[in-house]
Image (cartoon, grey):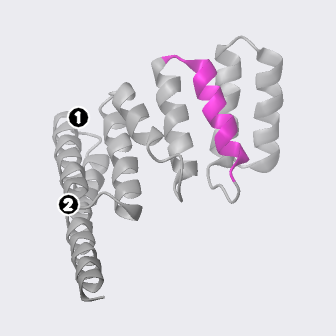
Amino acid sequence: VAAGLGAYSYLHWQEGKAQAVQQQAILLYQEAFVKGSNPEGEKENYKKALEKFREALAVYNRGNVFQISQIYIGHCHYALKEYDQAVAAYSRCLEGPFRAIAFDGLAHSYENKGDFAKALENYKKNMEEDHNPFQGEGLIGAARCYEALNQKQKALEVYQKALAINPNSRM
């Protein structure tokens, strides 16, 4: 029992240490996100954030620390236009509480790579998720993909569905 309690305490301590590093990484990510007018500074902050998220994973790579770090790693790679690496990171989060974010990231990454069929597949999976805050965005993304795949009528139907859900959309 003492060994089990010791192991639990150690893992809990490691998780706390990883969460502290992860918070530093999130602050760097947010700083990069806000620096839109300074592309070089933005790039450097995304790279620094990537290093910190990887550092957090080196300390503790389970549970929410793992999931959140992978999502942000995907976001950083996406922002750096490293879409293959973004796809790899988002793909590690398809099981767990951040599935909708992972599908959304995958869809956008594939769309930016020009793979509209895979993007559409991920937008559709994303829209199937319960309690999904990205459903309207997923519809618009799916419509863009249908349009790019030269399925204009289907694109129009999906755009109309998106507008019906959110009539105030600026699409």
Residue where numbered disc 1 is placed: 39
Stretch of the chain drawn in magenta: 114-129
Q: Which residue is drawn at 26% across and 39% down?
A: 37
Q: Which amino acid does label 2 sit on?
A: Val
Estimate the x, y position of residue 48 in percent, counting from the top left. 16, 46
Instruction: Give the residue pinned by disc 2.
Output: 59
Question: Residue drawn 29% across and 32% down?
Answer: 80
Above or below, comparing residue 64 to residue 6 in the picture: above
Drawn side of residue 95 relative to residue 89, left or right:
right
The image quarter in which residue 4 lies = bottom left
User: As displayed, is residue 78 above or below residue 66?
Assistant: above
Side of 22 where 161 appears, left or right: right
Q: Judging from the image, what secondary structure is the residue with disc 2 in?
A: helix
Question: Which quadrant of the rendered structure holds the N terminus?
Answer: bottom left
Q: What residue type is labelled 1?
A: Pro
Q: Identify which residue, 28 or 163, lies in the foreground.
A: 28
> Sequence order check: which comes first, mark 2 or mark 1?
1
> In this rendering, is residue 121 above or below 55?
above
Residue 170 in view here:
no
